[in-house]
Image (cartoon, rainbow, N blue to C red):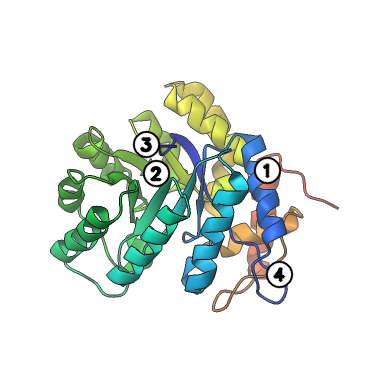
Amino acid sequence: MSIPSGSLVAIVTPMCADGSIDLPAFDKLIDWHIEAGTHGIVVVGTTGESATLSSKEHCSLVAHSVEYANGRVPIIAGTGSNNTDEALYFTESAKNHGADACLLVTPYYNRPSQEGLYQHFKKIAQAVEIPQILYNVPGRTACDLALETVDRLADLDNIAAIKDATGDISRGLELIKTCADRIAVYSGEDAIGRLLILAGAAGSISVTANVAPALMAQMCTFALAGDKQAAQEVDSKLALLHANLFLEANPVPVKWALYKMGLIGPTIRLPLVELDSKYQLQVSEALVAASIELPT
């Protein structure tokens, strides 16, 4: 499979009370997304708590996802790291386990130069023959992948797309203008996803899709078809989710929301903790606004 257009969910990693990965709950989420029309599933990304998974858990969950999905939906594996050799290892492992593509976040904490970023992504792209999605989220990494660097990387084989999570619509529009003829551009910010897709982006790699997969898939489909009014009508139901699922660091609010929906347990790994009680009403209100029924 190639990287799909539309709604790609940055899926959570459900966990048991003892902190281990809850594979039965994870499998149910995959089934739910397939039934709801989600176009692709991104595992072990930021929302999947990749930062606190061991290397063994990371690779095993990618392998399990591919095996369980069994070709029913594309699986994109988060394989980025601030250690180039580790990112290369994760990317090779994802390819060997049958992932359809990889998502590589910019190296966090190290604060590399633009040339360092170029060489980092170039090395992985040249070493592993699998479609690779650049992932720019400077708010979390303290590292911004400049437009000029993306422009250079877009000419390399295996660099297939970029997830822009800057939250800056002007940046997204510049990426579309400069690079969309060579690589796909995906929104990584739910609040502006519709606008970027209408402007030429290929889709959204979404947190909101975790709790409202059918609506996100519908919105993306309408936007890709250029139906502005229909896309806006659906997106208006999701607006509170787009905002309130980021009241605390992702994935704290979205995991709490899925717990309240009865789909996963409440466990999240330290140093993150369960959503503060002062935000719980706001997240619940966002779920209601999207017509999501909560068990009593």
Q: Quadrant of residue 80?
A: bottom left
Quarter of the picture containing the N terminus is top left
Count of numbered labels shown in the rendering: 4
Query: Which badge, 4 or 2, is on the more N-terminal residue?
Result: 4
Q: Amino acid at mark 3?
A: Leu
Secondary structure state at the residue bearing disc 2:
strand
Q: Taking 25 as reference, is 196 above or below it?
A: above
Q: Are marks 3 and 2 in contact (CB under 8 Å)?
A: yes
Picture coordinates of residue 102, whole percent (x, y): 39, 52
- Taking the spot 20% from the left edge, 54% from the top edge, the residue there is 146
Query: Which badge, 1 or 4, is on the more N-terminal residue?
Result: 4
In the image, farthest residue toward the right: 296
Q: Which residue is mark 4?
A: 16
Picture coordinates of residue 71, whole percent (x, y): 55, 39
Crowding at mark 4 (Cα within 10 Å: few <14, some 14-19, many 20+):
some
Q: Residue 187 — which label? A: 2
Crowding at mark 2 (Cα within 10 Å: few <14, some 14-19, many 20+):
many
- Taking the spot 39% from the left edge, 53% from the top edge, the residue there is 103
Front-most of 70 and 204? 70
Frontmost of labels 1 and 2 is 1
- Taking the spot 60% from the left edge, 45% from the top edge, the residue there is 69
Q: Taking 196 as reference, is 225 above or below it?
A: above
Query: Which badge, 3 or 2, is on the more N-terminal residue?
Result: 2
Crowding at mark 1 (Cα within 10 Å: few <14, some 14-19, many 20+):
some
Query: Which badge, 4 or 3, is on the more N-terminal residue?
Result: 4
Q: Which residue is mark 1?
A: 32
Query: In whole angstroms, how far apart are the C-alphas of marks 3 and 2?
Result: 7 Å
